[in-house]
Amino acid sequence: MSKDFSKYQKIIHNFRGEVSKPSFDIKFTQQSKQMTKTEKFLLKMELKRLASTCTRSIDLRGLVNGECKLFQYCGQSHFLDDIAISVFQENVEKYQGYTFGVYEAVKNTENNFRVLYQKEQQNIDQAKSKQGSVQLPTKTVDKLQYPVKYFPCSERYNRMEERMNFVVPFAIALDDNQKKPVSSIDISVTGLKFRLNSKFPLYIDQKITIVFKDIESDFQFSRSDSLVYQIKNIYSDENTQIIGCQRIDDFESDDFKTFLLDYIQVNKRRYKINLENTIAALQSRSFEQYVLPKINELPIYFERNSNQIIPRYVLTTNNNQPTFQYWQDEKNHSNLHSLVNEERLPRLLKRHKQGKSLLVYSFIHHHQGKDYFYTVDEDQLSEESDFIPEFFAFAAKRASFSVTKLTYFAIDKSAIYSPFILSNSQDSDKQYINLPPSKEVINCINSLSFTVVASDITHEKSIAEYQHFSNEGIDVNKLKKFGHKRLKNKLVVQQLGITYKNLRQEPRFIYKTPVILESNEQEWQADSIDFSVSGLKLVLSESAGVCAGDVINMTFPSLQKITSSHELKKLPYEIIQVNQKKTLLNCKVYIRTEQHVGRTFFKLLIDKNKEKLTADKDSLLISGLAESLRSHYSQCIEVPTLIVQTSGSRYKVEVLVTNNQDNEFLERLRILSDRKGFYNFYPILTKLYKDNFLDSCLKKLVINAEPISDVLYIAIANNVEQIDRGVSIKFERELNTSVLRKNFIKQATEKGSFFCFQLKISRTNTPDLEYLNAELSYISTYAIHRSKQIEQDILSVVASIQCIDITHGVLYSHRL
């Protein structure tokens, strides 16, 4: 029989650890005077059950709103978070051991998702009973702290030696021969870290002499009893300094080096290897795998040729393809030279030195079947202030109007390779292939001059604002000088896809043949670009009214002439990807019930003509270039990206990935946080969690689908005392008139700061664990519980949220 003891929780709480005491019966009789005999009997049995010994292990991973870690008690392992550990220890002390009372208390902590859900349901039921038919949200949000930890993509310290956590006393002698007794924290063959419990003045590159004491019993110095080190880094706290230093004297063939090599190898399992850098690098590498393939901005690499700057390479993803395709003409030739050219570069460099980006406004004029690009940047407009209203009123009414934010980056050649940490200490047979860049790649990158990141920040409300800048007509003569001439010699801009795993299952071959497409009683002429057994890529002479997911019929008139055993007419293919202008189609065979004739034919064609056909090498001229430029951009990325992870049946956002943690917005979030080293993302996450907005977005999203976009208006007052009163957040759709938006912005700037972000929510791909396995395996050798937790964190990622700052563009469009 199941009995509900919830109304007796106070008695159960008071009798923890009392059942085995002689005074139990007397105390229990006094406390249960008002109960019936049956209730007394059942409650006494329940108290005895809770006091009986329990042998069950507790694993709360994914069941609580907290980070679980290994916790051991009397030789038994549990996975508990900090709150559960505190409850466990408190109840074990009360019950004098691990009992069922301890077990159930830990399983019912206040941050358990089941308990939280039950409380929410109770609150909703109570509110409904009070308000009658008034419907309340399914989820109440009264949380004011959303702590998020910062993870930079640039955290790649290539530690080449193993550091052993080893505490040994020694003395340091400074320049004036003054000696200080200290203790080591960790030690390597050529390095050392120690703690100095004073504010004694030390500085970077200072030379110090170290005199070892306790290890002389294990090893006798063959030269002198002191070694010279140089200080490389200093971390200071209130009264403590952590000093990292490196040995600089001649140690190529000394006995102390030999001793340390042997000593660390023999004792590293006893004293444990310092894994801080390896874990930090692995976390950085794993989150980078989720962030880079989902970027919405377009990194463009330029080279200088004959006093001209020429776009040479772009890093592309599914998300930034619309930006790349926008700058293509009617023949799919790139026009990125219209976006960044010799004339615009000085203005972009000036903005870069000021720590700012440059906004470029553009539209495309279609005339006699040709595309003509018009662009003007904000600095150009400031020189012709009278022309501003005319230009915006004219350009914003065109369907091709776009606002692009340009950010300049120098080429850092040291960032093109990301070696594994401690690669010389790992099993080379199990390593993922991660070779340094070849000479060809290095020479290619040496020819590049700089990088420009183009972010499309166009959105509906700002376009509407620009359209109302003026009611007068435009001066065509002034407009002409912002038009760009069509180049006679078209530029070839190479696309390099950001991928970590080759998803192409079949080889492709370059081949051009006419194709007739049919869909919904419409017909288009096309030519193939390449084909494989199960798919092909087509270019159309005109835009087609098709979308990704549509099934179309294809006829191959020229190929039909070379075969009589296969009928190549009206073969069904599914469209996998289509460009913005709907002139480039990626298709795969669509199989209903019977075998697909196209797949059979192309397999036979490839088998018989392998030597004649030209294989598509993924359009890469130099092998390894994509990986090097990808590694370079990972060190440049500044757009803040939030990582969404699963936690039980819910989603949590506790990770921020960016390389720019010092911008004004993140600084404000750091001030709002009550935890050191964390950012409080209340201004963004409170809206994403409200009314299950994030959950509903992720239900709609599938991998490789277009990201879901929304715009947030954020006001943060100066000297915030109460977060919910000092911070105001609105979705753009909540400010549905120009007056409301302007009032919100004005009030925000009067009381503090205004920020506006375009959120791009994307489903993430499955990670390539082979790429991470070398460092993950190394960590598991010395700290298996840490490696399991990291692996669990890696596999729990389901989405990313890019927070694109469009504040400047919104202020400009509202003339504020």
Image (cartoon, grey):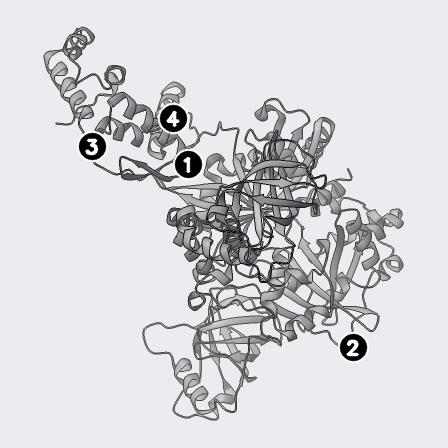
Mark 3 against mark 2, which lies toward the viewer? 3
Q: Is residue 791 visible?
A: no
**Which of pointers 1 and 4 lies earlier in the amino acid sequence?**
1
**Which of pointers 3 and 4 lies earlier in the amino acid sequence?**
3
Would you say the residues marked 3 and 4 are in contact, meaning their CB atoms lie under 8 Å apart?
no
Mark 3 against mark 4, which lies toward the viewer? 3
The amino acid marked with disc number 2 is: Lys
Instruction: Find residue 449 and report its image quarter.
Output: bottom right
Given residues 7 and 46, the one toward you in this image is 46
**Which of pointers 3 and 2 lies earlier in the amino acid sequence?**
3
Mark 3 vs mark 2, CA separation in Å: 82 Å
Residue to which mark 2 is pinned: 488
Would you say the residues marked 1 and 2 are in contact, meaning their CB atoms lie under 8 Å apart?
no
Residue 314 in picture, x, y percent from top left: 65, 65
Residue 754 in picture, x, y percent from top left: 69, 35
Image point (69%, 68%), residue name: 445
Classed neighbour count for the residue bearing mark 2: other residues with Cα under 10 Å, few (<14), some (14–19), many (≥20): few
Residue to which mark 1 is pinned: 66
Residue to which mark 4 is pinned: 124
The amino acid marked with disc number 1 is: Gly
